[in-house]
Image (cartoon, coloured by chain):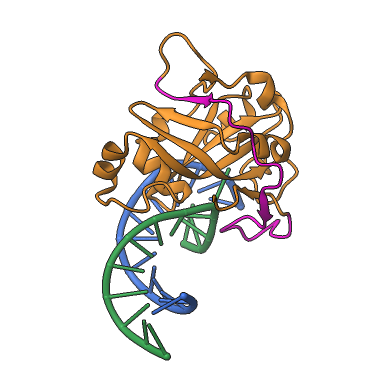
Chain colours: A orange, B blue, C green
Amino acid sequence: MTPISRSVLAGDAPAVARLLLNKVLWVGPCAGRIVEVEAYTRDDPASHSFRGVTKRNAAMFGQPGHLYVYLIYGMHHCANVVTGVEGDGQAVLLRALAPIDGVDEMAMRRGRTTKLTDGPGTLCHALGIDRSFDGADLCATTPAPRIVILDDGMPPPEEPLTGPRIGITRGVEIPWRFRVRASR
DNA sequence: ATTGGGATCGTCT
DNA sequence: GACGATCCCAATA
């Protein structure tokens, strides 16, 4: 159980997206395994970085291994892992987790006991991620971080499911959604 | 099982 | 001033 190294995240978003599958997102006391992600790059009409740096997306142009969090539809937060190198404007959207720890806490926040972390907005709600997490370093060990991505030794799937990204109107044809296949 | 509408607000045009 | 990398519930079949 060690924080993921920043060098792993320094690649292009579509490649890093696959590497993030089966890693663990920890926001004590809650943790969940990453099972679905989407990649966004700079020359990608669906990406927030497509039109350059703004106040909102500044973190997306920062150092890899940090978090980019934004509010969508006025009510849900979405969390992204910044990839590439500083200035690239690439990121991987965390779309779904399989809960591991802190399920009671998640259920409390969500006000339900099922479907706790099955979408980008719901997983942020369950883990308590909001805009105050924007720019947080996901690779840090000290001082005690409140959010980290951990590698517990489970490798990414060799052949993840791929398909179009969800909820976008431009760049629809780019198949940069990746998902762990149903287990068993 | 599938579909459709409403909630809600920060950001950029 | 419009709209978005969404979610949930109610209504329909």
Task: State the residue in front, A26 or A55.
Answer: A26
Task: State the residue in front, A23 or A37.
Answer: A23
The image shows residue A90, relative to residue A166, as above or below, that is: above
The image shows residue A102, relative to residue C4, as above or below, that is: above
Q: Is residue A105 left or right of residue A59?
A: left
Residue at 58% x, 31% y: name it: A154
Image location of residue A30, percent across then percent down: 36, 32
Rendering quarter of residue A168: bottom right
Which secondary structure dominates the residues rendered in magenta? loop
Image location of residue A135, percent across then percent down: 50, 25
Residue at 45% x, 43% y: name it: A98
Rendering quarter of residue B5: bottom left
| Magenta-span inclusion, residue A27 | no
Q: Is residue A175 left or right of residue A100?
A: right
Image location of residue A124, percent across then percent down: 41, 41
Residue A179 in sight from this viewpoint: yes
Residue at 57% x, 30% y: name it: A58
Q: Residue furthest front?
A: A184
| Magenta-span inclusion, residue A162 | yes
Image location of residue A23, percent across then percent down: 55, 32
Rendering quarter of residue A12: top right
Q: Magenta residues?
A: A146-174
Residue A86 in sight from this viewpoint: no
